[in-house]
Image (cartoon, rainbow, N blue to C red):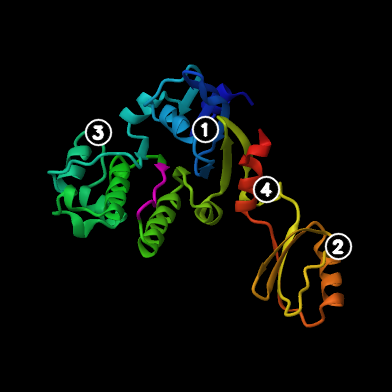
Amino acid sequence: MTQSTAVRAGAAVALSGLHKAFGEVRAVDGVDLVVSPGEVVALLGPNGAGKSTTVDMLLGLTEPDRGEVGVFGRSPRAAVVDGVIGAMLQSGSLLDDATVGETLGLVAALHREPLPVAEVMARAGVAELANRRCTKLSGGQKQRVRFALALVSDPDLLVLDEPTVAMDVETRRQFWQSMRDFTATGRTVLFATHYLEEAQEYADRVVLMRSGKIVADGSVAQVRATVTGRTISAVVPDYDGEPLPGVRSVETRNERVLLVCDDSDTTLRALLARFPRAHDIEITARGLEEAFLALTGEEQA
C-alpha cells in the first residue's frame, strides 16, 4: 500500500519521503511513517535525531523540503483548522497575565465545536487552577495546562512533545491515567519522550529515529527483540571475576553480579556449578533501553 493510498484509507498520520535540512544539517532524511487510527505511538531518539522537526512538519509549523504530510487525509493546516489534531508542545508559551480558565476559554473560542472548558479542566486535572494566573504556575502545572489546551478541540489525534517533563511521580501517574481515558475512546496519540519506561508502559508501538532516519519501528516486544541476549542477576558472595561461558559483559554491585549473556541457560549452569552459594537469581530479557542504545548509538552510523 502506498502512502497516498493509506491516506485515502483513513490513516491518522501518513508521512511520505519527508526531508528537511537546515544548512548542511539533514534534520529529517527520508522519513516514511503511517499511523493507524487508535494507535498510541512513542517517538524516540537521542537529541538531534529529528523528532522535533518531524513533529513540527506534522503540525504544519515547518514546511518539508520534500515529501508529503497527511493527517486523516488532510493537510496539517486543514487538520488544525478542523480541530482534528491537538498538540502539547514542551516549548509552548502560556499567557502569563491570564488565568488558566481565561486561557482555555480563549482557545476554545477559536474552534468550531470545542469541548466545554469545565470538562477540559476536569480531564486534565487542572480544575483547581482555574483562577490562577499562568505566571504563578509551577513547571508541572504548566504542563498540565498545556495538556488541557491540546484537548480543547476534542481532537482525533493528539501530538505530545515530552509531555511529563517537570511533573512529579504522582502527577505523571495521573497524566497517563488521563491519557488512558482519552485513548479508550479510540483516539490516536503520537508522543515524543526521553522517559523510556513511559514508552515501554504506554505505547502500542515504538518508532526510533537516529540522524533523521527511522531505524526501528514496531511493538515494544519487537524492538526489544532486536537486541539479543538476557541478563542474569544474582547474589554471588564468593564471585572471583573469572569469565563464565556465554557472558558478554559483567557488572558487580557489592555481592550482586549482573551477567549479560548470549546463552543464559549455559551461563546459569556454569554459574551454579562454580558458585553453589549463589542465590536470589533473576533472569530478564534485555529491555527497551538496551535496544534504544544499540539502535541509536554512534556505532550504527
Rendered image: mark on residue 245? 2
Predominant SS of the magenta segment: loop
Q: Quadrant of the N terminus?
A: top right
Indicate whether residue 163 is drawn in magenta: yes
Q: Residue at x 52, y 21 (%)?
A: 19
Horizontal side of residue 88 vs 201, given as left or right: left
Picture quarter containing residue 3?
Answer: top right
Q: 51 or 13, which is in the foreground? A: 51
Picture quarter containing residue 232?
Answer: bottom right
Q: CA distance from mark 3 to mark 4?
A: 41 Å
Is 244 situated above or below 167?
below
Q: Which residue is mark 1?
A: 11
Q: 238 or 144, which is in the foreground? A: 238
Mark 2 Cα shell of 10 Å, populated few (<14), some (14-19), many (≥20): some
- Looking at the image, tell me whether mark 1 or mark 2 is earlier in sequence order: 1
Q: Which amino acid type is shown beneath numbered disc 1?
A: Ala
Q: CA distance from mark 1 to mark 2?
A: 49 Å
- The residue mark sitting in front, 2 or 4, is 2
Is 253 situated above or below 238?
above
Q: Which residue is mark 4?
A: 222
Q: Residue at x 67, y 36 (%)?
A: 300
Horizontal side of residue 27 vs 141, given as left or right: right
Q: Position of residue 185 (x, y in %)?
A: 43, 50
Secondary element under disc 4, as helix, strand or loop, is: helix
Q: Which residues are magenta?
A: 160-166
- Looking at the image, tell me whether mark 3 or mark 2 is earlier in sequence order: 3
- Looking at the image, tell me whether mark 3 or mark 1 is earlier in sequence order: 1
Q: Position of residue 91 (x, y in %)?
A: 33, 39
